[in-house]
Image: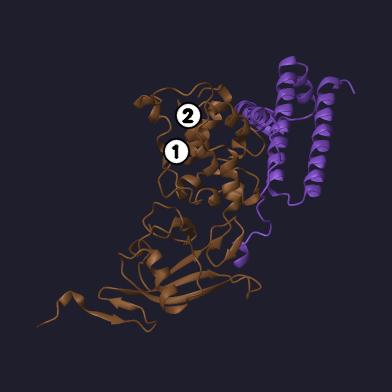
Chain colours: A purple, B brown
C-alpha cells in the first residue's frame, strides 16, 4: 500500500528547453479528425463484412476481388488502413511516452512501434494496389 | 450554581478532550520518518471528533496529544493559503475544508485515511517537496508581461474582458489538481494543471502581452497536449476552478491563436 503513494521516480526539477514545434498540436488534431473519420469507415466496414447479405459467410476470394475492382472500395480500404495505423500508432506513442521509465526502454519500444507501423502500412498499401484477381 | 448543560466534556483515553456529541473515529495516517524508517507505513489513531470538526482539527489533536513528531503543513487553516492539501480517503482535499460529518460511516466505526499528495517527492509524513510543482509554475511566467511605454494611468479593462479569466484567478497553488493528474504521476515533466491554470490567467488577460510566449511554452511536448481530460483536476480543486475547461481553452487558443 505504501508504494502506491511514494512513486519511485522523483519528479524532474529541470525541464528540457521548449522545442518550438507544432508537432504535438498537429498530432492532437489528427487524433480528433481521424477518430471521427474512422467511426464512419470502421463501422461501415464492419457492417458490410459482418451483417449485410449473410455477413461473414459470403466472404471469399471472389468477394474481395469484386470489391477491390472498384476504386471506391480500394480508396475506402486504403484510407482506413492509413488512418487506423497512424491513429493507433500515435496513441501507442503517447502511452509509451507516459509509461516507459527509462529513456532506453522508451527509445526501443518506439522503434519497435515505428517499424511495425511502416511494415503494415507498406504491406497493406502494396496489396491494395497490386491485388491480382486472376491468380 | 449549576453548570450549563451543554458544557459537558470528558477526556478521551488518548488525552484529547472529548466534548459532548463527539464520536470516536480512527484516523489512519501515512507515516514516514526518513531518519528512522526504511519505507513509509500506515499508523492508526483513535481520536474523538465532533461532526463539525475539520480533518485538520484531528491532525492537530494527534500532533498535540498523541505524537508530536507528526509532520504536516498548515498555515491559515481556512482554505485560503493552500498549505494543507493532502489525500483524504483517497482524494485530494484541503484538510481544513473537509468536515468530519461528511466522512462519517453510515454504520460502524469511521476510518479516515490521510496520505500525502501523490507524485511529489515525500519528505516526511504528510510533507512533500513542492519544488517540482513550483518549478512548473515559474516556467509559465506567472507575471504581467508588457512591452512599450508604461501608461500614465491604470490599465483599463472591461468587465467582459475580466470575466474571461475570472475563474483561474482563484488558484491558491495548493497542488491538489496537479497531484491528482495521472499524466503528472506518470510523467513528472508535464507542466500539470496548476501551471496551465496560472498560464490561462495571464494568457486571457487583455492587459497582458506575453500570451504568445506562454502559448509557445504550453504548445511543447510537455504542455497542454498531454492532457487526457480525465477531470481529476476539476474534481480535486478546493476553489472550484473548472481546471479542465481552462486547459481546453488554452488548447483552443493554440489551435486558432485567439486570446
User: Closer to the camera, A22 or A15?
Assistant: A15
Q: Which of the 4 image quadrants contains residue A123?
A: top right
Residue A46, percent across and down? 65, 31
Residue B39, percent across and down? 64, 71
User: Closer to the camera, A43 or B6?
Assistant: B6
Which residue of the protein is positioned furthest toward the right in this rendering?
A135
Image quadrant holding the C terminus of chain A, namely top right
Image quadrant holding the N terminus of chain A, namely bottom right
Which residue of the protein is positioned furthest toward the left in this rendering?
B1
Same chain assignment for discs 2 and 1: yes
Q: Is residue B26 above or below residue A54?
A: below
User: Closer to the camera, A49 or A1?
Assistant: A1
Which residue of the protein is positioned furthest toward the top in this rendering?
A71
* Distance of label 2 from label 1 (alpha carbons): 10 Å
* Circles 2, 1 touching at the beta carbon (< 8 Å): yes
Judge from the rendering whether residue B120 lies leftward or rightward of residue B48; answer left or right: right
The image shows a total of numbered marks equal to 2
Residue B113, percent across and down? 47, 66
Q: Is residue B159 above or below residue B137?
A: above
Q: Secondary structure at mark 1?
A: helix
Residue B147, percent across and down? 54, 24
Q: Which label is found at residue A95?
A: none
Q: Chain of mark 1?
A: B
Residue at 25% across, 75% down: B20
**Residue B174 appears in view:** yes
Name the residue that disc number 1 marks: B168
Name the residue that disc number 2 marks: B204
**Residue A133 appears in view:** no
Amino acid at each position: 500500500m505504501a508504494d502506491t503513494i511514494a512513486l519511485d521516480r522523483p519528479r524532474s526539477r529541470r525541464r528540457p528547453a521548449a522545442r518550438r514545434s507544432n508537432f504535438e498540436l498537429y498530432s492532437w488534431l489528427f487524433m480528433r479528425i481521424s477518430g471521427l473519420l474512422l467511426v464512419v469507415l470502421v463501422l461501415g466496414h464492419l457492417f458490410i463484412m459482418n451483417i449485410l447479405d449473410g455477413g461473414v459467410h459470403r466472404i471469399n476470394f471472389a468477394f474481395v476481388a469484386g470489391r477491390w475492382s472498384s476504386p471506391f472500395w480500394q480508396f475506402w480500404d486504403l484510407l482506413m488502413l492509413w488512418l487506423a495505423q497512424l491513429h493507433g500508432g500515435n496513441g501507442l506513442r503517447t502511452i509509451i511516452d507516459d509509461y516507459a521509465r527509462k529513456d532506453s526502454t522508451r527509445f526501443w519500444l518506439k522503434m519497435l512501434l515505428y517499424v511495425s507501423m511502416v511494415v503494415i502500412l507498406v504491406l497493406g498499401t502494396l496489396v491494395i494496389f497490386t491485388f491480382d484477381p486472376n491468380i | 450554581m449549576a453548570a450549563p448543560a451543554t458544557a459537558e466534556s470528558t477526556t478521551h483515553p488518548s488525552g484529547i478532550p472529548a466534548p459532548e456529541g463527539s464520536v470516536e473515529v480512527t484516523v489512519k495516517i501515512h507515516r514516514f520518518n526518513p531518519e528512522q524508517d526504511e519505507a513509509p507505513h500506515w499508523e492508526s489513531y483513535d481520536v474523538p471528533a465532533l461532526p463539525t470538526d475539520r480533518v485538520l482539527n484531528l491532525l492537530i489533536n494527534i500532533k498535540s496529544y498523541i505524537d508530536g513528531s507528526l509532520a504536516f503543513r498548515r498555515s491559515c487553516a481556512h482554505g485560503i493559503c493552500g498549505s494543507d492539501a493532502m489525500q483524504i480517503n483517497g482524494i485530494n482535499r484541503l484538510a481544513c475544508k473537509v468536515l468530519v460529518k461528511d466522512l462519517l460511516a453510515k454504520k460502524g466505526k469511521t476510518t479516515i485515511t490521510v496520505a500525502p499528495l501523490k507524485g511529489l517527492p515525500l519528505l516526511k509524513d504528510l510533507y512533500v517537496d513542492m519544488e517540482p510543482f513550483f518549478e512548473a509554475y515559474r516556467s509559465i511566467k506567472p507575471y504581467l508581461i508588457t512591452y512599450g511605454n508604461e501608461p500614465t494611468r491604470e490599465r483599463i479593462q472591461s468587465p467582459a474582458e475580466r470575466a474571461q479569466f475570472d475563474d483561474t484567478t482563484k488558484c491558491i497553488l495548493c497542488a491538489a489538481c496537479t497531484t491528482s493528474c495521472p499524466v503528472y504521476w506518470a510523467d513528472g515533466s508535464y507542466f500539470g494543471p496548476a501551471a496551465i491554470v496560472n498560464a490561462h490567467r495571464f494568457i486571457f488577460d487583455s492587459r497582458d502581452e506575453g500570451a504568445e510566449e506562454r502559448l509557445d511554452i504550453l504548445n511543447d511536448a510537455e504542455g497542454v497536449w498531454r492532457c487526457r481530460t480525465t477531470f481529476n483536476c476539476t474534481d480535486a480543486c478546493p476553489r472550484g476552478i473548472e481546471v479542465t475547461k481552462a486547459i481546453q481553452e488554452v488548447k483552443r487558443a493554440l489551435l486558432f491563436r485567439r486570446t
